[in-house]
Image (cartoon, rainbow, N blue to C red):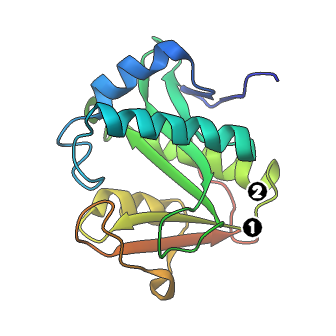
């Protein structure tokens, strides 16, 4: 099967390679990045996360892909699509998600990557609606969801202890509402 690759102005979203994991974890498995994601992962959690990401690709043809910066080939994190599998959540719905290293924050990379993933969700993977999950205190995450045109759906919020004690909040956008965004 051909490697997945999607290019934006500054980024490449692509399939995982064995050599991606070390720089990905070095850059993203930090207290600041993992604050709302259950904390820094040990070896067991990192291995399980890697297997989940690879299984999403194998099972559905999409995953949270590597984000590589075009200018220097640095791995900035991940962004992409999966099927919601959070206990208590809207299971099976197309979900967009992202995680970027701290030194990549505030530069528009997450918005650029997420907009590309949403385009793929609606155009390539024929999603009718795409959700995104976070927790209320993670204002940067839900702020980006709003800048992408997503709306809060409190009726879909759910308790889940995977990432701490906060309720998972749900944003969504449907195919008809997605206009794309200038990243």
What numbered label is drawn on residue 46?
Answer: none
Seen at 69% across and 61% down, the residue is 179
Instruction: Label 1, secondary structure: give it.
Output: loop
Looking at the picture, tell me which residue is in the foreground, 30 or 181.
30
Local crowd at mark 2 within 10 Å, few (<14), some, or many (≥20)? some
Q: Compute the Cα span from label 2 to label 1.
A: 6 Å
**Where, by quadrant of the figure, is residue 62 drawn?**
top right
- Do tag 2 and tag 1 residues touch (Cβ < 8 Å)? yes
Most extreme residue toward the bottom is 155
If the image is split into quadrants, where does the N terminus sit? top right
Where residue 147 appears, x then y in whole percent?
47, 61
Q: Which residue is mark 1?
A: 175
Most extreme residue toward the front is 44
Seen at 52% across and 16% down, the residue is 18
Residue 183 appears anywhere in the view: no
Instruction: Label 2, secondary structure: give it.
Output: helix
Residue 129 appears anywhere in the view: yes
Where residue 51 appears, x then y in whole percent?
52, 36
Where residue 182 appears, x then y in whole percent?
58, 47
Earlier in the chain: of badge 2 and badge 1, it is 2
Where residue 4 appears, x then y in whole percent?
72, 28
Seen at 50% across and 82% down, the residue is 156
Q: Which residue is mark 2?
A: 122
Left or right of 142? Residue 138 is left
Seen at 22% across and 48% down, the residue is 39
Local crowd at mark 1 within 10 Å, few (<14), some, or many (≥20)? some
Left or right of 154? Residue 140 is left
Left or right of 131? Residue 75 is left
């Amino acid at each position: 099967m051909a490697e997945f690759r999607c290019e934006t102005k500054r980024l490449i979203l692509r399939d995982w390679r064995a050599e991606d994991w070390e720089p990905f974890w070095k850059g993203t498995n930090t207290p600041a990045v993992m604050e709302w994601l259950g904390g820094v992962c040990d070896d067991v959690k990192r291995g399980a996360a890697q297997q989940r990401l690879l299984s999403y690709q194998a099972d559905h043809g999409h995953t949270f892909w590597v984000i590589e910066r075009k200018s220097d080939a640095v791995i900035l994190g991940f962004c992409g699509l999966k099927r919601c599998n959070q206990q208590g959540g809207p299971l099976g719905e197309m979900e967009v998600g992202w995680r970027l290293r701290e030194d990549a924050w505030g530069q528009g990379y997450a918005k650029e990557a997420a907009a590309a993933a949403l385009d793929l969700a609606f155009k390539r993977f024929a999603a009718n609606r795409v959700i995104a999950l976070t927790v209320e205190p993670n204002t940067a995450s839900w702020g980006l969801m709003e800048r992408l045109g997503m709306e809060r759906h409190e009726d879909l919020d759910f308790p889940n202890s995977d990432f701490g004690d906060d309720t998972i909040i749900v944003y969504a956008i449907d195919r008809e509402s997605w206009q794309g965004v200038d990243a």
